[in-house]
Amino acid sequence: MLSINGNRLMERINTLGAIGKDEEGKRTRLAASDTDKEGRDAVAGWMKDAGLKVVTDRIGNVFGIWETEQNKEEAPLMLGSHIDTVINAGQYDGCYGVIAGIEVIKTLKEAGYTSSRPIAVGAFTNEEGVRYAPDMMGSLVYAGGLSVDEALATVGTDGTILGEELKRIGYEGTVEPGFLKPYAFIELHVEQGPILDVEGTPIGAVENLQGISWQRITIEGVANHAGTTPTNMRIDAGLAAAKVITFMRDRCNQSSGKTVATTGCIEFEPNAVNVIPSKAVFTVDVRNPDEEKLKEEEKALAEYLKELEKTDKVTISTERLVRFEPVLFDEGIVKLVEQAATERGLASRRITSGAGQDAQMIARMCPTAMIFVPSIKGISHNPKELTSDKDLVAGANVFLTVVAELSNAKEERGI
Ligand code: HGY
Ligand code: MN
Ligand code: MN
């Protein structure tokens, strides 16, 4: 059976993983930053090394394309993921899928395979959404869910403009997003959750992905002296924010684990140890695989904020940052993933993606699915994120089998 070059895969994952580390060893490659540029340059170099045509579109998505005179009129099979990271990130999230995509194509080419359709691997811009919201921005624009000009005008958390930053790092492409109309899309990714690791299952056949709701909430209270103000006279924005965070945790606990909620960012004004906060600005990320349940959570939160305005005499405003409905992946490709795992003697199980993914956006364009490999202890968005080399290579080989099947790659040797 044809297999990928495991050493090359791991060497590249570790090379990319070393890019963007600061003096404390924290790995951060926020979208369109200098470290993101370094990562992009490395990946574009590996695409060229595989003999791929490298094309950057206007939102900075970078594609490596393998096409021949015989197949270039056919709709391409598309692979891909992202290489931008969160702050102080792990080295596998996104990067694994992009590097494995290049590896799979290079392996097919080296083995003398020809495929009935072009195969393209993409590194999508700003999947994480940490610097510029929304997340999965590059793939959302690619799929036509957000105008490229609107996306390029996005103001970041640091006041920069995405389009200017892409230009500054040399990744302001000229080709319109959506220039390739994929026949199908398949993304390989680490699970980022604990299920496969706990069960000892090496392959996840991802059949759906949960809905995501991000909002920024601003609570205005009254600054006052921390020592002289009696408790019953306080209009405390900080306390009200804390009540929202615990309210959402209670909702999660009542949802038998289906709803998850996170406040990842919070800022107080004037942010002084002895001043009752006059303002709290914080984010709420709520997710649920069921659209109706997610709507219920959003409604419950909105009602609670209204109640809080009365009980705590604060003023509350909200700003929607992201809202993506749950996505169902293509049953035919999910089955292909299970078959490919079996062919390679690997156990697999159906699984839901708790994380947002570029695949959820490209699923708007074509039949799409994902392959997961285990994350040890389910840790992710954390430098301790880890998947064993063995699982990474096994996942990439299942990916190879699925890609060969979907692209009808033919050669005398079985794979
Ligand atoms: O937010 C997410 O789930 C993804 O990591 N962007
Ligand atoms: Mn990811
Ligand atoms: Mn991520």
Image (spheres, rainbow, N blue to C red):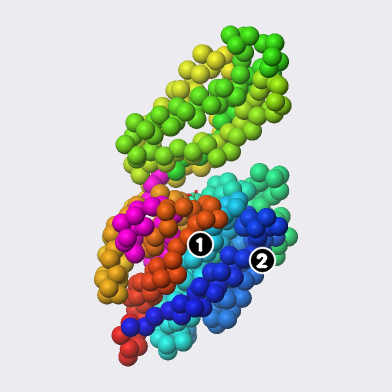
Q: Amino acid at mark 1?
A: Tyr
* Label 2 crowd bin: few (<14), some (14–19), many (20+), radius 10 Å: some
Mark 1 CB lies closer than 8 A to ligand 2: no
Observer-nearest of 185 and 334? 334
* Mark linked to residue 63: none
Q: Is residue 242 above or below residue 144?
A: above
Residue 355 spot, x, y in % from top left: 44, 50
Q: Report which residue position mark 2 lands on.
A: 38
Observer-nearest of 386 and 19? 386
Residue 109 spot, x, y in % from top left: 46, 85
Q: Amino acid at mark 2?
A: Glu
* Mark nearer the N terminus (2 vs 1): 2
Q: Residue at x 54, y 69 (%)?
A: 13
Asked whether, in this view, residue 135 is left or right of residue 355, the answer is right
Observer-nearest of 381 and 125? 381
Asked whether, in this view, residue 101 is left or right of residue 203, the answer is right
Q: Residue at x 70, y 65 (%)?
A: 170
Question: Tags 2 and 1 in contact by the CB under 8 Å rule?
Answer: no
Magenta span includes 188: yes
Q: CA distance from mark 2 to mark 1?
A: 16 Å
The reply to whether residue 277 is visible in this rendering is yes
Magenta span includes 242: no
Q: Is residue 59 above or below residue 391?
A: above
The reply to whether residue 205 is visible in this rendering is no
Q: What span is in magenta? A: 184-211
* Mark linked to residue 92: 1
Residue 181 spot, x, y in % from top left: 45, 66
Q: Residue furthest right?
A: 168
Observer-nearest of 73 and 104? 104
